[in-house]
Image (cartoon, grey):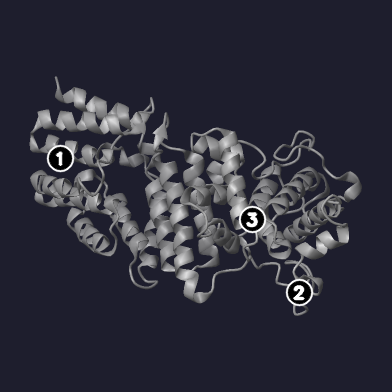
């Protein structure tokens, strides 16, 4: 297996494969990943790396491999050289080189080591060419930690002589860096999707309904904010707080994908499934952490309902009206098993409790079979743990299903001030008023909810409910 040298350095614009010929696509270098649906569907098992047969390796196999190793290679370079932005550029060039060469030359025995070596050479080439700022030897020395002169980079060097095992994964450390406390939640999400998820800036911009230039500036500011941050996992006393931030970012990415807060589409498949893929990666590294297992279970169980959430014209179908035969039963079985496992991995936290609630919904063959008393009991535990208004609103629905709509309305009214007039409160109020027979008040609440959401499918659904009550 040959490796590209400085003489054949790829000068193509980053993020394209126009000159790579028929090679596999590069994660983050193409606006659409045709296999993401299969790779990251809720029931897909990504915890085991699939061995590649040299005589049967396909472009799709190579794309899988590059996508899996990209954050690990970036983590390795950031660990060694300490500069995020040039390291990411070098990794992109290595991925492009692999996508062009591997389909013809076969996949190397140690793909990650190959990518690290090529990316390291590209990065050192770039640093040495920076004559305007300092001499090339000083550039490399200034950006290389002292121990790197005697310790080879990750994936290189014999075990026991300073080299870390090739199987050691920097993905979690990279996630911690992307979710650094110096960053805003919006910046954390954008940087995580770019550096760990491998999405292009254009993809992230489309997912957030902003201009690509705006998102590029956001990502650039995030990179500047973490410049100089030490690339290591948090100390034990800080680990829980930092891991909570990572999981919160993944949860926010999933929620935005599952129910988009704005725009013409109810569901943004790439975002939801990318969140699942990243959470699988974290669980592979922390298999006994109940919060991680619980979050993955929650995502898988929720995403399993996606095929039944919209009608032929993209219209929203509420949970109690969905055709449950369309739900992904394989994903439900996986998610239920994960939820049960999460409850054995320490005290039940927010994600474990939400996963248990989602499992009870998914296990019901019909809406009327839902175990609402048990769901209410779980919500009681959840709201006792967290001040999250969404959890309190879910509890109000459960109260209505167990004790009647008027009891639920009392709980909803108590939330009105704390929620800041969120449209979901109006939507739940409208639904309960309709069930209670107060159609005029229900119609008013439906219209208020429709006016409060930026999601076009949700607004159409809410107005349709209001129109039905006016006839």
Looking at the picture, tell me which residue is in the foreground, 58 or 451: 451
Q: Position of residue 315 (x, y in %)?
A: 34, 28
Residue at (57% x, 38% y) in the render:
203
CB-based contact (under 8 Å), mark 1 and mark 3? no
Q: CA distance from mark 2 to mark 1?
A: 64 Å
Real-space CA distance between mark 2 and mark 3, rounded to the nearest whole angstrom: 23 Å
Residue 305's quadrant in the figure?
Answer: top left
User: Gap between marks 1 and 3, in whole Å?
Assistant: 47 Å
* Label 3: how many Cα within 10 Å (few below 14, some 14–19, many 20+): many
Q: Is residue 42 visible?
A: no
| Outermost residue, front side | 133
Q: Which residue is mark 2?
A: 147
Q: Which label's residue is closer to the chain start, 2 or 1? A: 2
Q: Position of residue 172 (x, y in %)?
A: 57, 63
Residue occupying the point 34% across, 72% down: 347
- Which quadrant of the figure has residue 285? bottom right
Residue beneath the point at 67% across and 48% down: 61
The residue nearer to you, when weighing 82 against 16, is 82
Of the 4 image quadrants, the one containing the C terminus is top left
Q: Earlier in the sequence, mark 2 or mark 3?
A: 3
Q: Is residue 72 above or below residue 344?
A: above
Q: Is residue 339 left or right of residue 146?
A: left
Name the residue carrying label 1: 432
């Amino acid at each position: 297996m040959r490796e590209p040298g400085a003489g054949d350095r790829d000068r193509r614009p980053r993020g394209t494969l126009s000159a790579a010929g028929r090679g596999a696509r590069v994660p983050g270098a193409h606006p659409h990943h045709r296999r993401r649906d299969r790779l990251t569907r809720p029931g897909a098992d990504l915890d085991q790396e699939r061995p590649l047969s040299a005589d049967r390796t396909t472009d799709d196999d190579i794309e899988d491999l590059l996508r899996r190793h990209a954050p690990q290679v970036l983590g390795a370079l950031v660990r060694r050289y300490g500069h995020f932005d040039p390291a990411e550029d070098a990794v992109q060039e290595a991925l492009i080189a692999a996508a062009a060469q591997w389909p013809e030359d076969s996949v190397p025995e140690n793909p990650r080591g190959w990518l690290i070596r090529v990316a390291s050479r590209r990065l050192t080439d770039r640093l040495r060419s920076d004559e305007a700022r300092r001499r090339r030897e000083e550039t490399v020395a200034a950006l290389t930690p002292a121990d790197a002169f005697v310790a080879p980079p990750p994936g290189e060097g014999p075990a026991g002589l300073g080299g870390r095992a090739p199987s050691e994964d920097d993905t979690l450390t990279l996630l911690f860096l992307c979710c650094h406390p110096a960053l805003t939640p919006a910046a954390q999400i954008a940087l995580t999707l770019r550096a760990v998820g491998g999405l292009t800036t254009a993809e992230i911009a489309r997912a957030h309904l902003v201009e690509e230039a705006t998102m590029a500036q956001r990502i650039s500011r995030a990179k500047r904010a973490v410049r100089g941050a030490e690339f290591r996992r948090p100390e034990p006393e800080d680990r829980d707080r930092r891991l909570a931030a990572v999981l919160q970012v993944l949860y926010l990415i999933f929620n935005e994908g599952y129910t988009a807060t704005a725009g013409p589409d109810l569901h943004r498949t790439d975002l939801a499934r990318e969140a699942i893929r990243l959470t699988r990666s974290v669980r592979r590294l922390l298999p006994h952490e109940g919060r991680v297992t619980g979050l993955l279970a929650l995502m898988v169980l929720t995403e399993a309902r996606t095929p039944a959430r919209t009608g032929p014209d993209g219209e929203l179908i509420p949970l109690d009206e969905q055709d449950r035969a369309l739900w992904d039963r394989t994903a439900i079985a996986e998610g239920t098993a994960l939820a049960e496992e999460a409850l054995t991995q320490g005290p039940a936290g927010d994600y474990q409790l939400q996963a248990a609630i989602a499992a009870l919904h998914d296990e019901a063959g019909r809406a009327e079979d839902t175990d609402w008393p048990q769901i209410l009991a779980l919500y009681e535990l959840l709201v006792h743990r967290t001040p999250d208004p969404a959890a309190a609103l879910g509890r109000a629905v459960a109260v209505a299903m167990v004790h009647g709509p008027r009891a639920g309305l009392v709980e909803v009214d108590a939330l009105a001030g704390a929620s800041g007039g969120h449209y979901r409160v109006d939507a739940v109020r409208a639904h309960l008023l309709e069930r209670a027979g107060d159609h005029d008040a229900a119609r008013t609440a439906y219209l208020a909810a429709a006016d409060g959401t930026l999601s076009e499918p949700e607004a159409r659904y809410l107005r349709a409910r209001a129109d039905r009550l006016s006839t």
